[in-house]
Amino acid sequence: MRDEQFIRGDVPMTKSEVRAVSISKLELKPDSVLYDVGAGTGSVSIEASRFLTGGRVYAIERKAEAISLIRANKDKFRADCLEIVEGAAPEAMTGLEAPTHVFIGGTSGSMEAVLALVLQKNPKARIVMNVIALESLGAVLTWLKKHSVTAEIVQVQVSKGRLAGDCHLMLGQNPVYVVSFGGEGGTVFE
């Protein structure tokens, strides 16, 4: 889906090309139960919901502006299998059904607690995390090593063309690290 299709504000959004890679790495099935942690505008939730003919998406978000945008995008795209969960993760996730898949776009520093709760609910959950800051990547790598998890890490670097006079120039976006692990045939946490 093109980024321009989403209702936007000042809330960060996972861009189209990165979203495509992240959703691919989730390996969703029609009946998946997906948590989108730090859902922002809801772009991942909305696009993933199109694959879930018999599943559910829980968009977990704590910021009021973001929640309003998720609601607006949910209505615009008629994402009926999307439920908005207001609050900070992991506390807001405690009463939810167990996920089969989890996308983590942001945890506001509570990554370890979010992963602990997810893996307590379903040790076979497929997890995909997007990180931009090197400090966040370092924290993810430390967690993976501590738990003896082998993950696939892909760096996505996107440049988009823009017109400057008669010429087209490429404008680079932030590189994003897409970290994926678990799921069928992956690490099982006990």
Image (cartoon, grey):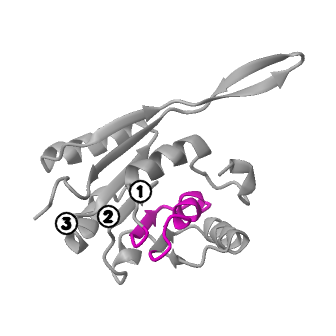
Report the number of discs. 3
Q: Residue at x 57, y 41 (%)?
A: 17
Which residue has dot 1 on it? 104
Q: Residue furthest top?
A: 167
- Which of discs 3 and 2 lies nearer the camera? The answer is 3
The residue type indicated by label 1 comes to Ile
Q: CA distance from mark 2 to mark 1?
A: 9 Å
Give the x, y percent position of residue 62: 52, 69
Which stretch is magenta?
30-55
Residue 157, image x, y percentages: 52, 30
**Is-magenta flag for residue 43?**
yes
Picture residue at 44% right of the left edge, 75% below the top: 55
- With 67 as the anchor, is 6 left or right in this view? right
Measured Cα–Cα span from mark 1 to mark 3: 16 Å
* Quarter containing the C terminus: bottom left
Disc 2 residue type? Val
Q: Is residue 112 left or right of residue 91?
A: left
Residue carrying label 2: 114
Q: Position of residue 9 (x, y in %)?
A: 72, 57
Residue 123 image label = 3
